[in-house]
Amino acid sequence: MWFEKGLPSRNLQPGSVASHDWARKIILDDIGHKRLKTLSPDDVEVMFRRRCDAGLSKSSLSKIRTTLRIALQWAERREIVFRNVATVSGLPPDAAPSPPLKSMTSEQVCAFLSASTDSHLDAMWRVMVFLGIRPGEAAGLSWDDVDFANQIIHIRRTLKRGAAGELYIGVPKTMQSVRSLDAPDEVFDALRIRKRIQNVERLAAGEVWTNEEGLVFTTSVGTPTDPAKNRKEFDQVVKEAGLAPEWSPNSLRHTAASLLSDAGVPLEVVADQLGHKDTRMASLHYRHRVRPTVSGGTTLGRLLANP
């Protein structure tokens, strides 16, 4: 009932709806036979234990608990239940943590970009690693968003996947995601090459060419690039760069944030670059250590030695 009536009122993006649907199916499989009014924290924790033993990570279990909590909140407001057992249900203490996210070092970035030169999506990788934009924002970039004269990239749209699997151009994730970013020469040099290549592809495709959105990154016939195929091309570049196969396109966003922070860029500026409303996400999830040691002590020593 909640999925059909309550969830649509939240006006979520298709990806968030899919995540809730995934969790909902697990909840129904495990405790769907329980009466809501008799559902107990023990019932919920038994579900968590079962799913933990089946291999779900702590973050996945947290997503399930969040979906259950939201659904029971909806039921509480309608007096279908009188307490939200999800709020007092604990996760198994031995639940496996999610693999830690991390950043490439500057040396790894150089190796990656060197190997990327012959990639069809070379300009995409450079836009992402220098600007820290999301994969969908890069894939949804149009030529109207590229200001060659002033070397500014405008982030106004993003490529999304609908509930039925279709790709479409939509609005960015949040209001803060709409932003204008200065970009270095290397990004615009790659974009100029990309524009020439696309013109050749357009002429070769002839009447089958379709690019109504004016996208920068397209297939050889002008359709949007598929994220799954982009990932395969990214993996090939990683392999050719001699890097361990542990990176994803989104790693470039984490890398941009981490290298900017390591270079002394204020966290507020890093947050603006990423399109976050404050520094919390940048600090907790996107800024990673990129040096083997922390050099704050030696830096302070130099400062105190030269007052």
Image (spheres, rainbow, N blue to C red):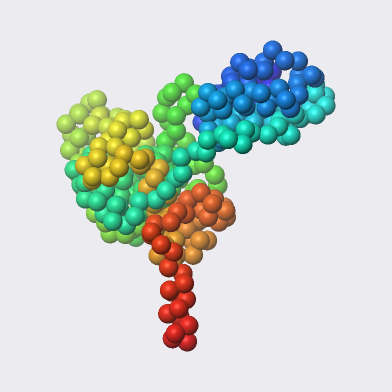
Q: Is residue 38 visible?
A: yes
Return the x and y of residue 168 as percentages of the image width and height.
43, 30
Above or below for 14 versus 111: above
Return the x and y of residue 177 as percentages of the image width and height.
50, 48
Q: Nearer the viewer, residue 210 or 286?
A: 286
Above or below for 219 versus 265: above
Return the x and y of residue 77 as percentages of the image width and height.
79, 29
Q: In the picture provided, is 301 more to the left or to the right than 202?
A: right
Return the x and y of residue 190 as percentages of the image width and height.
25, 50
Q: Residue furthest top?
A: 33
Q: Nearer the viewer, residue 201 or 104?
A: 104
Q: Quadrant of residue 6?
A: top right
Q: In the picture provided, is 40 more to the left or to the right than 290?
A: right
Q: In the picture provided, is 80 more to the left or to the right than 115?
A: right
Above or below for 246 versus 74: below
Q: Quadrant of residue 174?
A: top right
Q: Residue furthest front?
A: 94
Q: Is residue 212 visible?
A: no
Tell me the quadrant of the picture where the N terminus can be found: top right
Query: What residue sits 35% from the left and 42% below the top?
Result: 247
Q: Quadrant of residue 151?
A: bottom left
Query: What residue sits 41% from the left and 62% below the top?
Result: 293
Query: What residue sits 37% from the left and 47% below the top?
Result: 252
Query: What residue sits 45% from the left and 45% below the top?
Result: 101
Q: Residue furthest bottom?
A: 307
Above or below for 257 versus 54: below
The tally of labels here is: 0
Q: Nearer the viewer, residue 74 or 153?
A: 74
